[in-house]
Image (cartoon, helix red, strand yellow):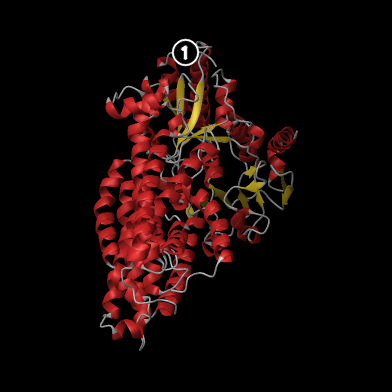
Amino acid sequence: MTNVAPTFDARHGAPLLLGLLGLVALVLAIAFLSITVGARPVTLDTVWAALTAYNPDSTDHRIIWELRLPRTVIGLLVGAALGLAGAVLQGATRNPLADPSILGIHAGAALFVVLGVAILGISQLSIYVWLAFAGAGAAMLIVYAVASLGRDGATPIKLALAGAAMTAALQSVISAILLTSPRTLDEVRFWQVGSLAGRNMDIVIQVAPFLAVGIILALASARLLDGLSMGEDVARALGQRIGLSRAIAGLAAVILAGASTAAAGPIAFVGLTMPHVARAITGPNYRWILPYSMLLAPILLLGADILGRILAPPGEVQVGIVTAFLGAPFFIALVRRRKLASL
Amino acid sequence: MHSALKTLLALVLAATPLAVHAEPWTYTDGAGETVTLDAVPQRIIATEDAAAALIPLGIRPVGIIASSQPQDSRALQGLDLTGIEMVGVAYNEVDIEKAAILQPDLVIAEYWPGDREWGGGPAVTGPDGQLRALAPVTGPAQLDSVVGLIEEYEALATSFGADLSTPEIAAAKANFERARDAFSAAAKAKPNMTALAVWPGDDGLWVAAPEGSAELMDLKRWGLGFLKTGLNPDSGYWETISWERSDTYQPDIILIDNRKPTNRASAEAKPTWTAMKAAAAGAIGEWPAYWLRNYTAYAGELDKLTAVVSAADENLTTAQ
């Protein structure tokens, strides 16, 4: 355990704060790119005109307002949520490979959506949101309950094992439904890969309150995560209530991962990799890791989405595919470069 | 070549009605395999597509394998299914016990030469499919014309002993021919007209190559012009276009895949749908994609298309 007590370190504080401001600038830059770059070339003048003097008869204006703007906002929100969810889960379970997919959250959300489509015949994205959310919550509850069985309660190892088992079980049910019902497969194929396209502001409005609560809860749990990162015994000796800390962090992660999965489908790698990048920059202090993850993840997600829009004109490559292609080699490089910070 | 052979064979069989009951039954299927039975098959299990073709010709299968519940099957709509057992209601799945109780003599499916696969799914009708343990699987091939396919089924039904000269069958065919001629006249009256067949997806606008669809090839043959796209049919029959670029192709009329009833509504909900002039002008028809198997259904779809073609402006867009 190389951690020292997680106190605010003034020596590192100033550069880290500057770095954070730099990231904010980068996020704004990538958001600007996301509004100006797309499958259809639209000049900067037109973008400006669309934003300042909207004309609903202009296709270009409609593209800016009704396609790129919602997509950018969703990208920012989902990215921030995935980054935070990953960081919080890694801290709470002290597992460097923790992310929403390892705790069964993605699989739970996906199963509920698939069931909704297969049994209830639902085909609107706006209802997927609620199904995904319910599924994420249910999966997390079951995983937590299973992991809590036995004397030691929900230890990191048991949580990760229960999550992995849950994911495997749910995935096989999902596959069974999809393989036998081409109609369901047609419906969810697009959602399942993960995409920012085809979502409108209604989706943003539906998930934004959840994301806001999740983000606040996650950022507020930094001190608890710092305590947990020292090991249960130390944290307990410092007077921290382990179970409560984990529950708060877990709740934040479920809200964030559920809402982001609902909005954009299960997007892998963003939540897994970005907290490690954040940790490499900031060191082991969660008061820095969390905001860094929250800003780094949307940069990757929106960057991947922008790339996907211009890779294969006049079509697009879904962001889930691009992040997997970018994220996997990046993650391998990260693991090879340095030993992952022990959590 | 094969289809000519099959038709000939069926005609020969049909021409010897007295001998049929005593003679073995033989059919060369769409995959080029010959199936021989000791007698004319009486108990047939058919895929939903084959059933949609055979029932109107007077051949009632004992069981149907479909990829959905019968009420959700476009192919089966409007057909009387009383007394017919549904032995499969999901793609690639069959209730093999139910099927075995039916004691089928023969399974009729369709062969898709492009995929080298039988309709119904590989686990059901494929080389090691479950139904093959009960009875041989055979049927015509999916080629480039629905009319051609229906004719294959007529030959097949005749070989089963169907009488195609009944007034109902003749009326259905006459009605189809009327609808076809009306469509053809409407299409030929507008030589500059260009059509585009699409599926409106959430991830983009899917544009179809007519070469991949038997009914679109029929429409083309009867005089409907299709917009030339950048698609190379050799490498796939669909092209996905970002909704930002929905104006990439500007047809005079748009045909929306009607396998999913909500497709038109979801297309119209896209902010850039009307970037296609035909969409803005309401020149939108239905594309009965891949599910037409009988003259009655075909005539109904053709009449709807004729109305759209007649109402549309052939010079809405200039030919590209």
From the top left corner, tell me how far across and down residue A259 is, in percent. Answer: 32, 56
Which percent across, then down, holds residue B34? 74, 47
Q: Quadrant of residue A38?
A: top left
Up/down of B242 relative to B315, above or below: below
Q: Position of residue B52 (x, y in %)?
A: 51, 41
The kind of residue tagged 1 is Glu
Using the image as rendered, state which of residue A277 and residue B6 is in the foreground.
A277
Which quarter of the rendering shows the C terminus of chain A?
Answer: bottom left
Residue at the bottom extreme, as displayed: A151
Residue situated in front as seen by the camera: B213 or A116 = A116
In this orientation, does residue A11 appear?
yes
Is A152 in front, or is B263? A152
Residue drawn 65% across and 61% down? B133
Which residue is denoted by mark 1 in the rendering? B314
Q: Is residue B8 left or right of residue A96?
A: right
Which residue is the extreme one toward the front?
A11
Query: How dense is the environment of label 1, judged by Cα within 10 Å: few (below 14), some, or many (20 and up)?
Result: many
Q: Output the chain of dot 1.
A: B
Q: Is residue A185 above or below residue A251?
A: above
Decide if residue B245 is on the left or right side of residue A74. Answer: right
Q: Secondary structure at mark 1?
A: loop
Task: Please say whether residue B68 is visible from this viewpoint.
Answer: no
- Residue B202, position in %: x, y? 42, 41
